[in-house]
């Protein structure tokens, strides 16, 4: 596999980063996790379970722009990338970010594979409250997980290479295998 961009999309806590690491065991890819982008800003703040100021997202978007520009202009064309993100239907910024990455893939003549990770509320709360998340500056509030699950719908996007998978009851290595199988058969 060469020049492929896999985009893992799902609620915070679905296991995007863990699945991405599993994928990297099987393909040579650069992992660009959403916290790789967010943490340069998050590290300079007092992180609580409260909602972050809107200005934070303007700053992380600037970091994302630099990363996208680097991929577009400097990264070798044969590189594979695995990107992760939380994208919500009701957030205009999330729509914009999805289409920016899709355009980046088109500009690089990359195979673009958006993967929608679905999860049950019970599984999400269990994963979201895991203590290891706090170390990576991730929200660990069960209340926030339940509220976001009930109120926030993941971005509904159309793409020929889209792959949907429910990760509620399957381990990350099995999820990664199913994603790779989808790519081999359909892309």
Image (cartoon, rainbow, N blue to C red):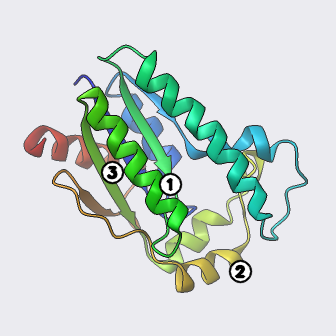
Who's the residue at 50% across and 45% down the image? 18
Percent x, y of residue 44: 87, 43
**Residue of label 1:** 15
Give yes or no for contact between labels 3 and 1 (Cβ–Cβ under 8 Å): yes
Circle on res. 134: none
- Front residue (pair 183, 130): 183
Can residue 173 be seen here? no
Q: Real-space Cα distance between discs 3 and 2? A: 26 Å
Q: Quadrant of the N terminus?
A: top left
Q: Real-space Cα distance between discs 2 and 1? A: 18 Å
> Which comes sooner in the sequence, label 2 or label 1?
1
In this rendering, is residue 41 above or below 13?
A: above
**Residue of label 2:** 143
In this rendering, is residue 99 above or below 37?
A: below
**Residue of label 3:** 175
> Which comes sooner in the sequence, label 3 or label 2?
2
- Front residue (pair 78, 73): 73
Q: Secondary structure at mark 3?
A: helix
Q: Secondary structure at mark 1?
A: loop
Q: Real-space Cα distance between discs 3 and 1? A: 10 Å
């Amino acid at each position: 596999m060469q020049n492929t961009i896999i985009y893992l999309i799902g609620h915070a806590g679905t296991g995007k980063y863990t699945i991405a690491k599993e994928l990297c065991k099987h393909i040579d890819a650069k992992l660009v996790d959403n916290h790789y982008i967010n943490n340069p800003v998050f590290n300079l703040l007092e992180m609580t379970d409260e909602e972050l100021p809107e200005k934070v997202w303007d700053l992380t978007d600037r970091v994302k722009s630099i990363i996208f520009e680097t991929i577009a202009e400097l990264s070798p064309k044969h590189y594979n990338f695995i990107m992760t993100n939380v994208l919500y239907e009701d957030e205009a910024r999330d729509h914009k970010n999805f289409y920016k990455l899709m355009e980046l893939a088109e500009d690089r003549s990359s195979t673009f594979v958006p993967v929608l990770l679905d999860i049950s509320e019970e599984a999400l709360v269990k994963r979201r409250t895991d203590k290891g998340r706090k170390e990576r500056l991730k929200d660990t509030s069960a209340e926030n997980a339940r509220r976001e699950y009930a109120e926030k719908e993941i971005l509904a996007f159309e793409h020929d290479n889209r792959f949907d998978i429910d990760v509620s009851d399957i381990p990350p290595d099995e999820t990664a295998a199913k994603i790779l199988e989808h790519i081999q058969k359909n892309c």
